[in-house]
Image (spheres, rainbow, N blue to C red):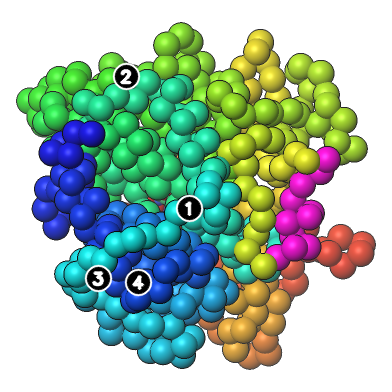
Amino acid sequence: MSPDRPAIVAVDGVFTYQDLDDASRRVASALLDGAADLADARIAFHIPPSFAWVAVRQGIWRAGGVAVPLAISHPAAELEYTIRDSGATQVVVHPSSAALLAPIAAAAGARLLTTDTVLGAPHRAPFPHLSPERRAMLVYTSGTTGRPKGTVIRHANIGAQVASLVNAWGWRTDDRILLVLPMHHVHAILNGLGCALAVRATCEILPAFDVDVVWQRLASGEITVFTAVPTIYRRLIASWEAAPPDVQRTRSEGLRNLRLMMSGSAALPISTLERWREISGHTLLERYGMTELGMALSNPLEGERRPGFVGLPLPDVDVQIVDEDGIQVIEGTPGELEVRGPTVFSEYWERPEETRAAFRNGWFRTGDVAVVEKGYYRLLGRTSVDIIKTGGFKVSALEIEEVLRTHPAIGECAVVGVEDADWGERVCAAVELRDEATLTCEDLQQWAKERLAPYKVPRALRTVEALPRNNMGKVVKPDVAKLF
Ligand code: MLC
Ligand code: AMP
């Protein structure tokens, strides 16, 4: 089937579907190393967004392994945690990250391979037969308990998620998507790459987000689909507004060839939607999703895309809004959003307690509060104040607090998400210092960067005599937020 069609266009070259198939066989052979089936062994990989990333991920699947994508932006401490928690037996790295990953892999007893080695390996068939019920990926996500959890996504989940989106968004073989998002989250992996590969379209992958390069590619007339988080649209708007009038005109005209521009992973403010419409002529299609279930709600491809709303349930996704007792509420009443169906994950990796708590009567409890108004779903917030969305990344206030408490100057602390025009929410920390100690925001950031992903590092710091607490002695987070 169309083996000569370009599958991936990236920093490492232009590759056809035939090239991808061939490369994934080589990778699978290297990983199997003579075995018949990796039998759900976890294979972590640390590769910048590129053809190599895709080939290695496909190769892991072909060999019967479970793919664990590592975040390029993470410091050693977070990488070490993910490798250990997943129990990865092999780690595939781009040569440029070998020095960072080699000691981590060695300490975890995992075999280290570079992309050069696996992509250059001789290929040996046969490969195992994979039933759809087999595990495909562990995607790490932050929650309201402890450290990030590995969300187990099975091949059947991915199949259902991608089929639902291909259908809803009218994916076509002659589509060409521009992918600019980090590849350790489902927005890039499923909505972008997954759909493109499913219909044998072309996926153009940038190594990182760069506003000028993105504008150049969007205005080229070659791209047909784009998906991003609201922060990225705000950056594109700011860049357009700062450009001279002739550049503005060329950019706006260049966007005409796109057939679909989407936003998700965080709330799209109506002002951003409207400004983008003025600049581009496109009404962004906003949709709602989550690592544990892929996408659940979407504005329609054809028909009304209602600003401020996330649309309707996608094909094959059951959605309900319930009260605190799990009883479905009537239209117009806010409640927690629950999701059910073949797209929904089945377990957090080796966390039976947390998995049990995540479901009620077979429904996954998203922790998002929503309401249905005139048939469309609107998100109102979250059931927990301890989940923060910054630039489309989900982070846990509790996880950050746990790390900050190990700082020698910090006695007690509280982390909150504060509304921010650029990031949606900004991670902010209020701390009670130990006797005589001093701490600047810069010092704290430098210290935290070695321990936390960059997007978890607090952007602002307040030192207080005593954190605001209630009668029970519990920190009152809304009062903490008022400090910023
Ligand atoms: C980067 N920084 C962030 C940040 N991203 N801080 C807070 N929140 C973020 N999201 C830090 C950088 O480390 C840097 O710190 C400073 O902010 C400025 O960096 P920058 O160069 O301006 O940022 P950039 O690297 O360009 O990143 C911006 C971004 C990125 C918007 C491109 O945040 C991003 O890719 N977001 C998308 C996340 C995503 O794909 N989420 C999907 C999850 S799946 P310093 O200290 O060095 O200055 C999901 C399900 C669903 O949610 O529904 O899709
Ligand atoms: P993650 O766990 O990183 O996959 O993030 C999932 C969370 O992102 C959801 O639970 C929502 O809180 C949030 N989210 C995703 N899409 C939207 C959207 N369109 N509007 C508001 N929040 C969203």
Give the residue type at disc 3: Val
Q: Quadrant of residue 134?
A: bottom right
Q: Are marks 4 and 3 in contact (CB under 8 Å)?
A: yes
Mark before the other along the chain sequence, 4 or 1: 4
Viewer-nearest of labels 2 and 3?
Answer: 3
Question: Cα distance, mark 2 to mark 3?
Answer: 42 Å
Total tally of numbered discs in the picture? 4
* Left or right for 225, reference 43: left
Q: Where's residue 17, x and y in %?
A: 21, 43
Cα distance, mark 4 to mark 1? 16 Å
Q: Which residues are magenta?
A: 351-361
Q: Which residue is mark 1?
A: 130
The residue that disc 3 covers is 118
Taking the image as shown, residue 387 lies to the left or right of residue 358, namely left
Residue depicted at x 92% and y 62%: 471
Is any part of residue 11 visible from this angle? yes
- Amino acid at the residue labelled 2: His
Q: Nearer the viewer, residue 109 or 22?
A: 22
- Amino acid carrying mark 4 in the image: Leu
Prevalent SS, magenta region:
helix
Gap between marks 3 and 1 measured at Cα: 21 Å
Element on which disc 4 rests: helix
- Mark 2 secondary-structure assignment: loop
